[in-house]
Image (cartoon, rainbow, N blue to C red):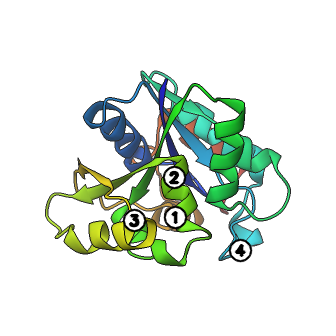
Amino acid sequence: MRLGILGGTFNPPHHGHVICAQEARIQLDLEEVRLMPVGEPPHRTIDPANDPGAEARVAMCRLAVIGQPGLGVSTVEIDRPGPSYTVDTLEALAASESDTQLTLVIGADQAMSFGNWRQPERIGELAEIAVAARVDHDRDEAVAEVARATGVEPRIFDMPRIDISSSFIRDRVYRGRTVAHFVPAGVAELIEGKGCYR
């Protein structure tokens, strides 16, 4: 199986995440793309005041993919204690799904710092790397950084410009404004029902 992995805090997941996952699936001819909420980010902490908890973030991801063909959710990083290093995640997936061809889906901003990731060369051995590049941005630097860090040329797929971020969503909720049009319906209901980000 050709499987894409899209990691992140997903705090909360929004339409931009879903669009990125679907564009990767379609343009890269993947059979499935799984949203993978991070357990413990290795390079930064999730502000406890803005974190509804791993269980809620997983639940929001599951709600976000309802009705989305070819999208799923993985809890590999949530289930594993300690910092969530991508190389460890890919090692675990390669061991448990040996008949699967892995594609790591990252944004151009993540690609720009790829040389700072743990064992980038090993990541390039374990998975094809696909960079989501907005059509209105120069993508050469992102491609060059991944290629330099891994020794492997990444694949590129076009991502439409969508100016939504999880911090934007959290701020709107905090200010008492609706986010129903920025996130999948089930996500908005969970945020409201649990009183997240207030």
Residue type at tag 4: Thr
* Separation of residues labelled 1 and 3 (CA atoms): 7 Å
Name the secondary structure under disc 4. Answer: loop
Q: Nearer the viewer, residue 148 or 132?
A: 148
Instruction: Write down the quadrant of residue 134 in the picture.
Output: bottom left
Q: Nearer the viewer, residue 112 or 69?
A: 112
Q: Position of residue 80 (x, y in %)?
A: 82, 50
Residue type at tag 2: Glu
Q: Nearer the viewer, residue 154 or 16?
A: 154
Q: Position of residue 173 (x, y in %)?
A: 55, 60
> Mark 4 and mark 1 in contact (Cβ < 8 Å)?
no
Q: Position of residue 157 (x, y in %)?
A: 25, 48
Q: Earlier in the sequence, mark 4 or mark 3?
A: 4
Instruction: Write down the quadrant of residue 138 in the picture.
Output: bottom left
> Mark 2 and mark 1 in contact (Cβ < 8 Å)?
yes
* Separation of residues labelled 1 and 4 (CA atoms): 25 Å
> Mark 3 and mark 4 in contact (Cβ < 8 Å)?
no
Report the residue marked by disc 4.
Answer: 45
Residue type at tag 3: Gly
In the image, residue 134 above or below residue 97: below
Numbered mark located on residue 121 in the image: 1
Mark 2 or 4, closer to the camera: 2
Report the residue marked by disc 2.
Answer: 125
Name the secondary structure under disc 3. Answer: loop
* Separation of residues labelled 3 and 2 (CA atoms): 9 Å
Numbered mark located on residue 151 in the image: 3
In the image, residue 93 above or below residue 100: below
Q: Position of residue 49 (x, y in %)?
A: 74, 71
